[in-house]
Amino acid sequence: MLFKFLISSDVKSSEITPERIYHNRREFIQAGVGFGAVAALGFNIPQAGAETTALKNIIRDGIYDTEEKMTSLRVVSSYNNFYEFGTEKDDPFRNAHSLRPRPWTVKVDGHVENPGNYDLDDLISPHALQERIYRMRCVEAWSMVIPWVGIPLAEIINKLGPTSKAKYIRFETLYDKKQMPGQYRRVIPWPYVEGLRMDEAMNPLTLMAVGLYGETLPNQNGAPLRLVVPWKYGFKGIKSIVRISFVERMPRNSWKIIAPREYGFYANVNPDVDHLRWTQASERRIGEFRRRKTLMFNGYAEEVAHLYSGMNLKKNF
Ligand code: MTE
């Protein structure tokens, strides 16, 4: 099934500077200007790594916003971690053109009422797309502010109907060496795996992103579907998801498998719990010179601290 809905035009990011389009869109929304052209969901991304399709005014403004300066699209889409395309920060930008994000099927299994193989369009209702500007914090002590486009993961979960046995949700990235040549090297036991506790997954902050800066996701940012959990370190944000499983036991996530003393399951941003090899008390916002103090739960304590009440966060890092 293919959803049809309104987008502004067939403008491609290759034709106009995406960041400028993006800022214009925000001004248009504020001025109440609408558009009329009809197009499909717009996930039919061209092959090039950084090329995207406009989502424009299908997006509703989300409830989460920030006055903080956003990190430029150039940086957001060229300084990445996506080991399936290489381990250097600029590898994904250079190499992710081999990923084919459409058509895209997501397998849903485990303790769930509606398992099956879902086309992306059936999993994500475009009517529910929101824009949310989130602070993102990487475990390597740099941070960015990114305007994501996506839908709350809770909406997808509600549609799939997990049973009472489902205590955790597990995600898997595509495993296809032809599309993801970095998988020829076993730097990670492929496929990349991540997971959340069910209540974390249901928290309204948790987003399944399909775009950023008003465009579909660039391949290097995890097209066509990736997780965004803004109060956790960036490695929880698994990219290019092809499988969602509802499970009873805590999933073994990739980084915990590789280095269990350095990376935990929870991965909550916590200035009081250092990484084995470096401090997590401060961070460098990309584009800024001075380091800033890292905030507990990346500044989202009000929304999520209750999820961990009574837990020892030093032990459960
Ligand atoms: N997902 C997959 N499949 N493979 C990866 O290597 N890297 C993670 C996460 N998701 C990664 C992944 C890490 S370490 C980070 S910091 C974020 O993606 C980076 O997301 P970004 O490149 O969009 O900023």
Image: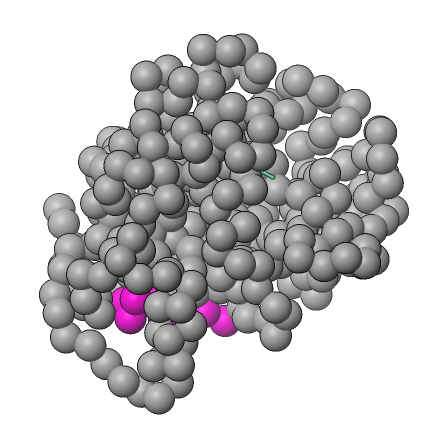
Q: Which residues are magenta?
A: 56-63
Measuring from the top left, give residue 216's x and y in whole percent.
33, 52
The structure residue drawn at horizontal position 52% and vertical position 50%, both measured from the top left corner, is: 76
Quarter holding the C terminus? top right
Q: Which residue extends farthest bottom?
A: 31
Q: Nearer the viewer, residue 14 or 45?
A: 14
* 146 in the magenta segment: no
Measuring from the top left, give residue 63's x and y in whole percent.
50, 71
The structure residue drawn at horizontal position 45% and vertical position 11%, both measured from the top left corner, is: 184
Q: Where, by quadrant of the figure, is residue 178 drawn? A: top left
* For residue 143, side relative to residue 102 (left or right): right
Figure label count: 0
The structure residue drawn at horizontal position 46% and vertical position 19%, both measured from the top left corner, is: 182
Measuring from the top left, give residue 61's x and y in whole percent.
42, 72
Question: Is residue 257 in view from this perspective?
Answer: yes
Measuring from the top left, give residue 111's x and y in whole percent.
41, 31
Question: Is residue 151 in view from this perspective?
Answer: no
* For residue 64, side relative to residue 181 (left or right): right
Q: Is residue 234 above or below residue 11?
A: above
Q: Where, by quadrant of the figure, is residue 25 drawn? A: bottom left
